[in-house]
Image (cartoon, rainbow, N blue to C red):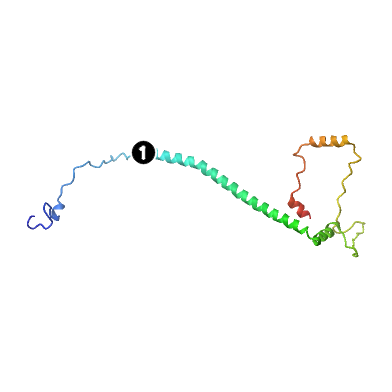
Amino acid sequence: MAPGSSRGPGRRPSSDRSRRPQRAGRPKPVAPRGRQAPRFTGRAVVLLSVVLLLIASYTSALHAWWEQRGDIQSSRAEIAMRKEAIATLEDTKKRFDDPAYIKQKARERFGWVMPGEVGYRVIGADGSVQGSVPTLDEPPTATKDQAWYDTLWGSVEQAGKDPAKAKPPADPDEVLKKQ
């Protein structure tokens, strides 16, 4: 160890470090003043094209997912609506098990009265019944008078009709509203 050096053999004092020569390496390239360095290199163009390709491929999958999600939501809403309609129909079915409810409906729909009660109808000056008048449906016509070949030909005519023009079956909700 050298006298006056407390750092160890072969080490220079800290004041000598600042006088170190700089490394000889490549100088940094400087772009000429009239021309700028290109913004996109070949690697950047390839990377950008790969990213755009991935975005395009995932967009179609994302679109399909979004449509399916909408279909699922609409199906869930329809299921909830149908469950509510089923609950309403089951409630109506349970009500018809009650004899008092049946009597009430018979009074409302057909104008029936219980034995011993007196039913009244208000008749206007023109002779028509005022207010709501319940009516019964016409009984079905008897087909016994019709020959078998007429019945057969009627079914052939019915089969030849366009089903699109036929009246669709009644909606249960509309039937309940009419009652």
Residue at point 76% right, 59% down? 95
Quarter of the image for residue 179 reads: bottom right
Q: Position of residue 85 (x, y in %)?
A: 70, 53
Residue located at (36% from left, 38% from top) = 43
Q: What type is the residue that disc 1 sits on?
A: Arg
| Vertical comparison of 28 with 119: above or below | above
- Residue furthest to the left in view is 3
Residue 145's quadrant in the figure? top right
Extreme residue toward the bottom, this view: 116
- Residue 166, picture quadrant: top right
At numbered mark 1, what does the secondary structure look like: helix, strand or loop?
helix
Dot 1, crowdedness within 10 Å: few (<14), some or many (≥20)? Answer: few
**Residue occupying image coordinates x 57% and y 47%:** 69
In this view of the protein, which residue sits in the foreground, 123 or 72? Answer: 72
Q: Tell me which residue sits at (52%, 44%) in the image.
A: 62
The x and y percentages for residue 107 are 84, 60
Please state the horizontal and vertical placement of residue 22, each as a whole percent of the image: 18, 46
The residue pinned by badge 1 equals 43
**Left or right, residue 98 beside residue 68:** right
